[in-house]
Amino acid sequence: ADLPGRPPLTRHAILTLTLALVTSAACTSQEPLAAPDPVEVPVRSSAGDESVRAMCAALIAALPDEIDPGVSRRAVTGDATRTAAWGDPAVTLECGVPVPDRPDQPAQVNGVVWSVRDIGAGFRWTTSGLAVPVAVDIPDAYENGAELVNPLAGPLKATLSTG
C-alpha cells in the first residue's frame, strides 16, 4: 500500500529491502547460552566413614539433571561426590550434614521427611530418617521449595533408605 505524501515503493526497492532483512536475520544467529560458572558449595562437615562417602557419591550420581523447568544441574567446585547444584540463583545440595539440633517446620514431600529452616536469604531443607542426612538450600528467588525437593525424593529413597 502506498503511504500518503511518500512516493510508491518500486519493485526493486521492495526486493532490496527484503534481501537486506533476510541477510540481517541470517547474520544475527542465536548463540547458545553459556553455561553458568560452577557453583561453590561449601561442605559444612566431614562425611564420616567410607560407607557414608559411598552413599553420598551414589546419591550425587543418581540426582536429576533438572529439578523444575529451567532449573538445570550445574557444575560444582569442591567435593563433587557430596554436593550438587541447580539453577541460577543456585539451589545447592550437600550430603552427609549434621542432623539439625532442633527440627523446624517438619514437612513430608513424596515420602521424604524434611526439617525446613529459614536461613535468611532462603530456606534449608534437611532430611530426617534417612541413613545419611542431606541439606538442600533454596534461595528466596524460588517460590515453592517443595516443588524443588520433590524430584529429589526418588534418588534420596533409592540411595539413602534405612529400610
Image (spheres, helix red, strand yellow):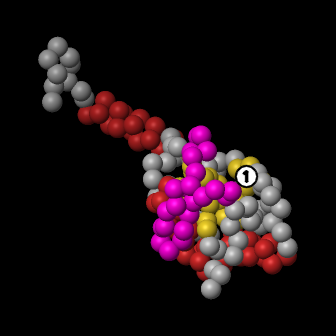
Disc 1, SS:
loop
> Left or right: where does residue 109 sit relative to residue 78?
left
Taking depth in this image into account, of 163 and 2 the one nearest to the observer is 163
| 28 is higher (above) or lower (below) than 90 | above
Which amino acid type is shown beneath numbered disc 1?
A: Val
Please give the name of the residue rendered at 64% of the width and 74% of the height, measured from the top-left corner: 130
Percent coordinates x, y for residue 101 in the rendering: 68, 56
> Left or right: where does residue 121 sit relative to residue 23?
right
> Left or right: where does residue 150 sit relative to residue 15?
right
Give the magenta range.
100-122
Percent coordinates x, y for residue 7 in the rendering: 20, 19
Which quadrant is home to the N terminus?
top left
Magenta span has 116?
yes
Q: Is residue 53 visible?
A: yes
Please give the name of the residue rendered at 50% of the width and 74% of the height, measured from the top-left corner: 111
Taking depth in this image into account, of 66 and 54 the one nearest to the observer is 54
| 34 is higher (above) or lower (below) than 6 | below
Residue bearing mark 1: 41
| 75 is higher (above) or lower (below) than 108 | above
Magenta span has 99?
no
Please give the name of the residue rendered at 49% of the width and 48% of the height, measured from the top-left corner: 142
> Left or right: where does residue 117 sit relative to residue 7?
right
Percent coordinates x, y for residue 114 in the rendering: 56, 63
Query: Which residue, as the protein is rendered here, is positioned at the far front?
Result: 102
Percent coordinates x, y for residue 76 in the rendering: 73, 55
Q: Residues within 10 Å of mark 1 (few under 14, many from 20)?
A: many
Please give the name of the residue rendered at 78% of the width and 74% of the height, measured from the top-left corner: 52
